[in-house]
Image (cartoon, helix red, strand yellow):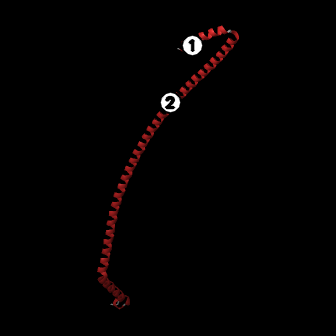
Amino acid sequence: MEIFQEAEFWVLVAFVIAVAGLVWKAGPQITKALDDRAAKIKSDLDEAARLKDEAQKTLAEYQRKQRDALKEAELIVQQAKGEAERVAKQAERDLAASLERRQKQAIEKIALAEAKAVAEVRNVAVDVAIAAVRRMLADDLDAPRKSALVDEAISDLSRRLN
C-alpha cells in the first residue's frame, strides 16, 4: 500500500498517537479542571441568585420604609396645617380682642378729654362770669347792696351744690 509509504501518513499517525496519549494522560486532569470550573460557575450562580433574592428583599423593605415615611410625612404636614389654622384663628381672635380693647381705650380717652375740655370751658366761663360780675358790681353797686348779694349767694350755694 502506497499510503504507508508517504511521510504525511506517518506524521498523521504520530500526531494521532500523541494526541491520544495526551488525552489519556491529561484527560482526567482536564476533566477535573472542567468539573471544578463548572462547580465554581454553579457556586457563583447560586451566590448571585442568593444575592439577588437578598437585594430584592432589601429593596422591598426600603420601599416599605419609604411608603411608611411618606405616610408619616403626610400626617406631619396635615398636623402642621391644622396647627397653623388653629394658630391663625387664635391670632385673629387675639387681634380682634386687642383692637376692641384699644378702641374702648380710645373711646375712654376721648370721653375723658371731652369731659376735661368741658370742665375747662366751664371753669373759664365761670371765671369770666365772676370777673364780669365783679366788674359790674364794683361799678354799679354800693356797699350795703354788695353785702346783701354776697349773703344771698352764700345761702344759695348749699342748694346749688346738692
Residue 60 pos. (x, y %): 35, 55
Identify the element where label 1 is drawn: helix
- Identify which amino acid the numbered label 1 is placed on: Leu
Q: Residue furthest bottom?
A: 5
Assess whether mark 1 and mark 2 are in contact (beta carbons under 8 angstroms): no
* 35 and 146: which is toward the camera: 146
Q: Residue at x 50, y 30 (%)?
A: 101
| Of marks 2 and 1, the one in the foreground | 1
Residue 102 pos. (x, y %): 52, 30
42 to 131, vertically: above or below = below
Mark 2 — residue? 101
120 to 141, vertically: above or below = below
Q: Residue furthest right?
A: 139
Q: Residues within 10 Å of mark 1 (few under 14, many from 20)?
A: few
The N terminus lies in which quarter of the figure?
Answer: bottom left
Q: Residue at x 61, y 22 (%)?
A: 120
Apparent side of residue 17 relative to residue 115 in the rendered image (left or right): left
Residue 40 pos. (x, y %): 32, 71
* 80 and 95: which is toward the camera: 95
- Identify which amino acid the numbered label 2 is placed on: Arg
Q: CA distance from mark 2 to mark 1?
A: 42 Å
Identify the element where label 2 is drawn: helix
Q: Residue 144 falls in which quadrant of the image?
A: top right
Q: Residue at x 59, y 11 (%)?
A: 153
Mark 1 — residue? 157
Residue 77 pos. (x, y %): 42, 44
